Amino acid sequence: MIVSGVVTKSVGGLFTVRTDEEYNGKRELDAHAKGAFKHNKITLLAGDRVDVEIDDHGEMYINKIHERKNSLIRPPLSNLDIIFVVISCKRPAPLYETIDKMISIAEYNKIEPVIVITKSDLDPEFASEAYSIYSNAGFKTFITSSETGEGCEAILEYIREISQKKDIVCAFSGASGAGKSTIINKIFPSLKLETGDLSRKIERGKNTTRTTELFPLDSLIGEGHLGYLADTPGFSLLDFERFDFFSLEELKDTFREFVEVEGKCRYTKCTHTKEEGCNIIERVKTGEISKTRHNSYVALFTILKAKPRWKK
């Protein structure tokens, strides 16, 4: 017998699969992976849609992974649709370049970035500045405060609206200490996720989440909501110098505000970094495109240009 479902977590080589339909009165099954996966160096990830084979003795084995929309290395997660990029106004101090790296990786993988500005009560001026940068760039942006609860209901409504229409997997990302777990707990209080204490000395959070686990949205929000919320140990792999995420030629396509106005520069092969007559640079000067976003683009361009030719 074959049943299909989604891998929601793994512990010691045992995978929990939430099935599309009940099997023996249960929606969650624990199954091992077939040996062929290890032999072919295929790693099962949370978010994978799989087939589970149940033999005559009731033993359960995952024997097929359906085609993935996307997959990430760290955290190990597949088929992600929405990533809530959490930006802290203070403690830790926000770094636009790091934020924009995450957004570019998401854009390349066809994951919709949604910006969540936290701790707005600590620096309302920065919160307003960041909101302007990312909303003007075309991203859905929320300003929140875990102290007052500002913005949390709006995020919940956003998730409710989308999950009523289609099956989604969403996750929260951001620097350690940015307040990811705190915000998630405000939005979904039934989860009661552990939150880390922020070290005032080094302004870095203790990473309290160790494994990736998916929580069904219908159990968090209510019946009729499709998909999952991923609790992850953090999106920590952003090193463009050592790892290949995309090529230099593909970089411009990961900045959506560039794509909308590209093709209007003086030179056909404009790199949008320093050329005279560059339409994008002119828009930076007039404030139509954020200077911080362009700075991040130039920094990534410099890194990717210096690398050996990227191969798929």
Image (cartoon, rainbow, N blue to C red):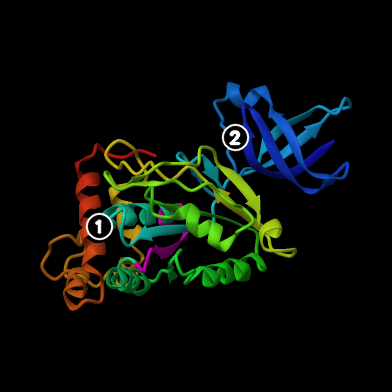
Q: Which three-letter amino acid code belongs to the residue tagged 2?
A: Leu
Q: Secondary structure at mark 1?
A: helix
Picture quadrant of residue 312: top left
Closer to the camera, 262 or 79?
A: 79
x, y percent for residue 309: 27, 39
- The residue drawn where x is 53% and y is 43% is 77
The Cα atoms of the two marked residues, 1 and 2, are separated by: 33 Å
x, y percent for residue 292: 23, 63
Viewed as shown, does residue 30 lie left or right of 308? right
| Residue 119 in magenta stretch | yes
Closer to the camera, 138 or 190?
A: 190
- Residue tagged 1: 297
Task: Point out the stretch of residues depicted in magenta.
Answer: 107-121
x, y percent for residue 75: 48, 41
Closer to the camera, 7 or 308?
A: 7
Viewed as shown, does residue 206 lie left or right of 96? right
Q: Earlier in the sequence, mark 1 or mark 2?
A: 2
- Within 10 Å of disc 2 (Cα), the crowding (few <14, some 14-19, many 20+) is many
Closer to the camera, 162 or 312?
A: 162
- Residue tagged 2: 44
Q: Please state, as top left, top right, bottom left or bottom right, where the N terminus lies in the image.
A: top right
